[in-house]
Each structure stands twice: as structure tokens, then as C-alpha cells.
Image: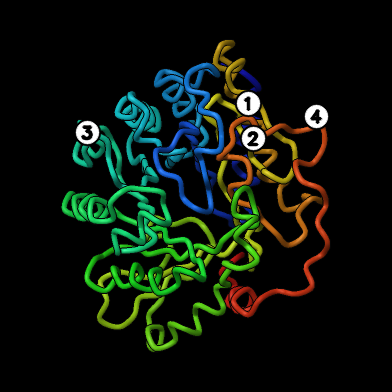
């Protein structure tokens, strides 16, 4: 691809390597449509824009992945909405895998109830290397209550099918006070399966704002409940799990898998954020708290993606100096809603009051240097 001189790319890559941070990866939201209605997300409240907004095509994804590969990017992750509802999902996965080339790591987040005609094996053959599965209760009735439908047994079958193919599997479970025991039951999947169960704090965003005051449970509290599990637990390196986000993944003695936390409400994580987020219509967002967005479609048409990636890598490098970040990192603030409007040249969010203090888990992480 043409664009700014490749010397700028070399300089930016050298500067990024000097920070010691993880190399950026591409986080694609493939759609905004979902056939579930989780209590903390409520996608059915949002209009289904379908193809009226002209989402990116498999050819677009391949071109973006090819340019990303020149920047040393080896990983792409697909989410939604529910990305498997796209009729061309196999083509998208194949395009990303081919575009990134040898050693590509391609992941996907799903609720695990795959539509008829789609299988984990087909996704794997297209190039998928790991799967993130959303599961919030093992009880089918309570799972359907949380997610607005679906079958947790089908989700478990999807997990087992991925493991049988040798794929890495992570299980995302959102912590809610009304379903805390359910979350602990999901966490126990790691006892006999080599999965990384990630207990996810509620964030005060979107529909979850209504739930937050009564349902939020902090990581520090959950660690107290699970203290006996963590006694003598060994730490699993993030590199071994294919995980790039901050946090500690612990493997209790005798367990096949591990338990980790995603705690963006109680623990600040911006210092290690490394995702370049790309919406269904091709808006790339290197930082969700500051308006450094760039539309990729014009660069796709003009074959100037190198210039676009130069902008993106500069923005990622400058993220730690973002004045809009004061202790909170709303990781999925605008990916779920592709039409989130930004004011030109302004922060996406108002300046937040300085956090009064860090939770115990954040202090522990800082002392251990795991967020550096």
C-alpha cells in the first residue's frame, strides 16, 4: 500500500518497541446485531442497521490485515454483536488469516449457540485459532434469564468442540450480584477443562448503568470468596494463554485451566491497552477516550492504508498522555454501538473526577509490576 514513507513506519515501530508494551492488535466489531438480549447489554434496544451502513467486506478485511501485517501485527479479534450471525463470517475469518499471513492469531467472541450450518470446525478450517465464549450460568434456565434466550448446554458443546480441535478457549462470565454463585459455577469449568475463565466486572456503560448500583461486584470481593481456590495457585503467563490484557491468571492446584479477571471498573488498565478497535463500517479507534478516530474506507479506496496506520500507531503511542483518562478505562464504550457520535477534535467522554484511590487488586498489580 502507498502512503507516508516506510521510514516513518520503521521509526514508529522502534519507538513502540522501546515502551516494552504489547504490540497492538486489531479488534474488529463485525456487526451490531445479536440474537440474545443480555441484561447488561440489551442489543435489541438498538436499531438493526443491517447492511444499510455498508459494513466492511471480506476484501476490505484482507486489505486491512495485509497492511497491518507490514506493521508487525499478527493478531485480529472479531466480536459484535454476535459475529457468527454474519452470513460471510467464514470469508471474513479466512480473509484476516490470509492477510496477516504466517503465524496469524485469529480469535472470535461468541455466545456459543452457533446458527444452523455453521460449526466450530468450519471456523477453525477458515483460520480461527482461538475462541472466546460468553457464558454466565451453567443452569439453562438462569442462563436464558441473563442472556434473554439460548442454551448453556449448546455453549458447553461449542467449548468442548473447540478444545477437541486444539484451539485455545477463554470463557467470559460477567459478575452480577444476583448471579454470583452462577459465576462461581462457570469458573469451576477450569477445574477439568484447559480453559481460561475470565470473571468480568460490570461497567457503568450503556444498559448496565441501570444495573450497576445493585449488581456490581468488584474483583477484590470475588477474590475473597474464592480465597481457598487461590491458595497455592500458580500464575499462568499471559503469553501462554494468548492473552494481552492486564491482569493475573491463576491456576489452582490440580486444575487444568485458570481463572483471571477483567476489572475495568475497579482497576485502571489504560497503561497496557493495545487494541486498535475497528467498527463494522470501518472507523478505526485507537483510543476510546480521545477523538483520534480515522475512517478507513477512504484509505481503502485510495490505497493509502499506510498513512492510516501511521496515524493509528502514533495515537496508540500517545495514549498514555491522554488527559481524558483519569483512572477509568471504558473498554467497550462505543464498540457495541457503531453510530456513537464524537465531536470533532474533542474527547469522547467528559473529563472524569480523579479516582479517590485504587482497589486492593490494583495496588497488588502495581506492586507486582503486571500493568507495566
Q: Which mark is residue 344?
A: 4
In this rendering, the answer to whether 231 lies above or below 234 is below
Q: Residue at x 76, y 46 (%)?
A: 349
Residue 63's spot in the image, x, y percent? Answer: 46, 21
Of the numbered discs 4 and 2, the one sitting upstream in the chain is: 2
Q: Tag 2, which secondary structure?
A: helix
Q: CA distance from mark 1 to mark 4?
A: 17 Å
Tell me how far mark 1 sits from mark 3, CA to CA: 38 Å
First in sequence: mark 1 vs mark 4: 1
- 130 on left or right of 291: left
Residue contact between numbered discs 1 and 4, judged by CB atoms under 8 Å: no
Residue located beneath label 1 in the image: 308
- The part of the image, by quadrant, that contains residue 188 is bottom left
Lower position in the chain sequence, tag 1 or tag 3 = 3
Which is closer to the viewer, label 4 or label 2?
4
Label 4: how many Cα within 10 Å (few below 14, some 14–19, many 20+): few
- In space, the residues marked 3 and 2 are separated at their CA atoms by 38 Å
Give x and y (percent) for residue 60.
46, 20
CB contact under 8 Å: marks 1 and 2: yes
Residue sitting at 20 percent across and 53 percent down?
157
- Nearer to us of marks 3 and 4 is 3
Q: Residue at x 39, y 21 (%)?
A: 58
Label 3 secondary element? loop
Label annotation for residue 312: 2
Q: Residues within 10 Å of mark 1 (few under 14, many from 20)?
A: some
Residue 45 in sight here: yes
Q: Secondary structure at mark 1?
A: helix
Q: Which mark is residue 116?
A: 3
Lower position in the chain sequence, tag 3 or tag 2: 3
Amino acid at each position: 500500500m502507498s502512503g507516508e514513507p516506510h521510514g516513518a513506519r520503521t521509526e514508529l515501530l522502534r519507538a513502540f518497541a522501546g515502551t516494552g508494551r504489547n504490540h497492538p492488535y486489531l479488534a474488529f466489531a463485525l456487526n451490531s446485531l445479536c440474537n440474545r438480549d443480555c441484561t447488561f447489554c440489551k442489543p435489541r434496544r438498538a436499531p438493526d442497521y443491517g447492511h444499510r451502513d455498508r459494513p466492511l467486506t471480506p476484501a476490505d478485511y484482507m486489505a486491512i490485515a495485509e497492511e497491518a501485517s507490514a506493521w508487525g501485527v499478527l493478531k485480529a479479534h472479531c466480536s459484535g454483536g454476535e459475529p457468527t450471525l454474519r452470513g460471510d463470517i467464514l470469508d471474513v475469518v479466512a480473509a484476516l488469516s490470509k492477510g496477516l499471513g504466517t503465524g496469524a492469531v485469529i480469535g472470535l467472541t461468541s455466545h456459543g449457540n452457533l446458527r444452523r450450518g455453521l460449526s466450530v470446525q468450519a471456523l477453525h478450517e477458515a483460520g480461527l485459532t482461538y475462541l472466546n465464549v460468553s457464558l454466565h450460568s451453567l443452569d439453562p434456565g438462569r442462563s436464558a434469564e441473563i442472556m434473554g434466550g439460548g442454551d448453556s448446554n449448546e455453549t458447553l458443546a461449542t467449548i468442548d468442540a473447540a478444545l477437541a480441535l486444539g484451539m485455545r478457549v477463554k470463557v467470559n462470565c460477567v459478575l452480577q450480584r444476583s448471579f454470583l454463585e452462577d459465576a462461581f459455577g462457570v469458573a469451576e469449568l477450569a477445574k477439568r477443562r484447559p480453559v481460561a475463565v475470565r470473571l468480568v466486572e460490570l461497567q457503568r456503560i450503556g444498559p448496565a448503568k441501570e444495573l450497576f448500583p445493585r449488581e456490581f461486584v468488584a474483583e477484590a470481593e470475588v477474590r475473597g470468596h474464592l480465597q481457598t481456590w487461590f491458595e497455592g495457585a500458580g500464575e499462568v503467563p499471559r503469553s501462554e494463554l494468548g492473552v494481552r490484557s492486564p491482569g493475573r491468571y491463576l491456576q489452582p492446584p490440580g486444575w487444568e485451566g485458570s481463572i483471571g479477571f477483567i476489572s475495568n471498573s475497579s482497576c485502571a488498565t489504560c497503561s497496557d491497552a493495545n487494541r486498535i478497535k475497528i467498527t463494522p463500517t470501518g472507523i478505526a479507534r485507537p483510543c476510546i477516550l480521545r477523538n483520534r478516530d480515522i475512517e478507513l474506507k477512504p484509505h481503502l479506496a485510495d490505497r493509502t492504508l499506510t498513512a492510516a496506520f501511521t496515524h493509528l500507531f502514533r495515537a496508540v503511542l500517545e495514549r498514555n498522555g491522554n488527559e481524558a483518562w483519569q483512572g477509568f478505562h471504558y473498554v467497550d464504550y462505543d464498540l457495541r454501538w457503531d453510530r456513537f457520535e464524537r465531536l470533532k477534535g474533542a474527547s469522547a467522554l467528559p473529563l472524569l473526577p480523579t479516582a479517590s484511590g485504587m482497589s486492593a487488586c490494583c495496588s497488588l498489580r502495581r506492586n507486582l509490576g503486571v500493568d507495566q
